Image (cartoon, rainbow, N blue to C red):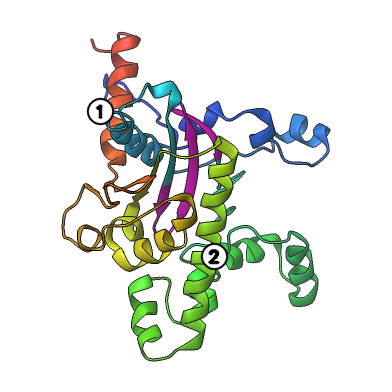
Amino acid sequence: MPGVPNVGVFDTAFHQTMPPEAYMYPISYDMYEKYNIRRYGFHGTSHAYVCDKIIGLLNKPQEETRIITCHIGNGSSLAAIKGGRVVDTTMGFTPLEGLMMGTRCGTIDSSIEAFLMEQEGWTPARLSEYLNKECGLLGISGISSDMRDIRKALGNGHKRSKLAVDMLYHQLVKLIGGYVVLMGGVDAIVFTAGMGENDAQMRKDVCQRLSYIGVELDLEINSSEQDFKLISTPESLVKVYVVPTNEELMIARDTREVVLKHNLLK
């Protein structure tokens, strides 16, 4: 398509507001300078979209808002967004870090990697394939990377499926709780992406574990077929939303903005 402007929209862009204490790793500083090893974060277009949707509903100035966005799908990440700016996110140098996912292990002791390479005789490429494609919910359950399959097995008393679900919930609650402390509170928690939008049981189980911060779920609305919905009760101290993500729309908006800003239309 000659003459048509091309725009690159990067999934890491929304996270570039993180301060150094959030994006730096505690490796030697020369390796950061040499290779730019730092936390970049991913799913940025999704986190930006759902955050933008919610800010206008909180009845306070944007700079005072505190939102935790939970993009939970086959790939999963959380973001702590204060005043409309990301202050921390769970994915890092690559999308492998953070929460356990469908087939990705998430954060583990990095010495495990060296141990596996020594014991199994794996190359770096084989190790990367294993950590990205054979771990997470699939690796623990031994059934599937799809929570729907795991729930069916769980209903039949499959112990490893229960372990996979318990591990996911444990990590979600731990990460959300950490972000609440980091931001000095939270106004809204937002669920999006495949599991976040469609798994009412997951939302219920996680939110019940967050009752200590005042989260109270409306179970009927949570189980309803609505797409965009407020699933917390009027009495809940924290609002909880389900927002269908729209990364394509964000990419289109960013593209339009760049094209108009630089007068690329001929």
Q: Residue furthest bottom?
A: 156
Q: Residue at x 50, y 75 (%)?
A: 164
Q: Residue at x 48, y 50 (%)?
A: 213
**Earlier sequence position, callout 2 versus callout 1:** 1
Q: Secondary structure at mark 1?
A: loop
Q: Is residue 36 left or right of residue 85?
A: right
Q: Are marks 2 and 1 in contact (CB under 8 Å)?
A: no
Q: Residues within 10 Å of mark 1 (few under 14, many from 20)?
A: few
Residue under label 1, please give it.
1
In the depicted structure, whether residue 150 falls above or below residue 49: below
Tell me the magenta residue range: 70-88
Q: Is residue 74 magenta?
A: yes
Q: Residue 133, can we see it?
A: no
Image quadrant occupied by the N terminus: top left
Residue under label 2, please give it.
170
Q: Is residue 152 left or right of residue 178?
A: left
In front: 13, or 54? 54
What distance separates the C-alpha of mark 2 from that of mark 1?
49 Å
Q: Which mark is residue 92?
A: none
**Main secondary structure found in the magenta portion:** strand
The location of residue 150, given as percent across then percent down, is: 39, 78
Amino acid type at circle 2 is His
Q: Residue at x 27, y 41 (%)?
A: 246
